[in-house]
Image (spheres, rainbow, N blue to C red):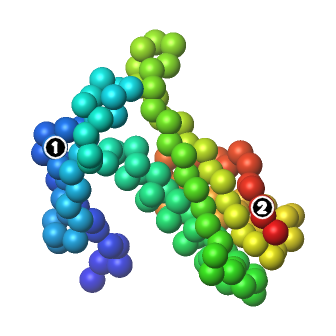
Amino acid sequence: MSRFYKASATAVGGRSGFASSSDGRLRVELSTPAILGGDDGPGTNPEQLFAAARAASLLAAIRQVAAGRGVRVPADSNVTATVAIGPDGANVMTLNVALAVDIPCIDISEANSIVEEAMGICPIARATGEQVSSVVHVG
């Protein structure tokens, strides 16, 4: 038996259509932002979906690392992923991700150490080769 969880989603219509998961739990309308030449409709977009997945994945990894160290991560801890898309110098679309992590009530140096280790085990960070550039800590 495979220990891998597999998720599958299908997009129809590209950036201005819809996407749904094979199990029916996810179905979202997609709209292209006006800044990218779209109609700025009511739907979400791939960058918002990626930002949500990126934030959730890192927070799960942070909780795993902290638990392994015997550190309690407060329930209100959070990760904000900001995803930017735009053309680079060669007019090829590029994606940038900025991460802000808030782990209240934990020493800043310990929080940074936990996040650094979590980046090493976070499946999305590993798949994309991301590095965290800064940790925001509110106390």
- Disc 2 is placed on an element classified as loop
- Disc 1 is placed on an element classified as loop
Residue 116, label in figure? none
> The disc labelled 2 sits on which kind of residue?
His
Front-most of residues 32 and 4: 32
Residue 17, label in figure? 1
Q: Position of residue 1 (x, y in %)?
A: 27, 83
Q: Quadrant of residue 33?
A: top left
Image mark count: 2
Front-most of residues 112 and 128: 112
Is residue 14 visible in the rendered image? The answer is yes
Q: Is residue 4 left or right of residue 110?
A: left
Identity of the residue drawn at 49% across and 19% down: 88
Relative to residue 11, is residue 88 depicted above or below?
Answer: above
Most distant residue in the top direction? 90
Q: Is residue 123 left or right of residue 16?
A: right
Identity of the residue drawn at 67% across and 49% down: 132
Label located before the other in sequence (1 or 2): 1
Q: Position of residue 74 (x, y in %)?
A: 69, 80
> The disc labelled 1 sits on which kind of residue?
Gly
Q: Quadrant of residue 92?
A: top left
Q: How would you rate the neighbour count of disc 1 (Cα within 10 Å): few for under 14, some for 14-19, many for 20 or more?
A: some
Is residue 120 visible in the rendered image? The answer is no
Q: Position of residue 57 (x, y in %)?
A: 50, 64
Identity of the residue drawn at 16% across and 65% down: 22
| Residues at marks 1 and 2, CA–CA distance in whole angstroms | 38 Å
Judging by the rendered image, the residue that carries numbered circle 2 is: 137
Q: Is residue 35 left or right of residue 59?
A: left
Relative to residue 5, is residue 21 depicted above or below?
Answer: above
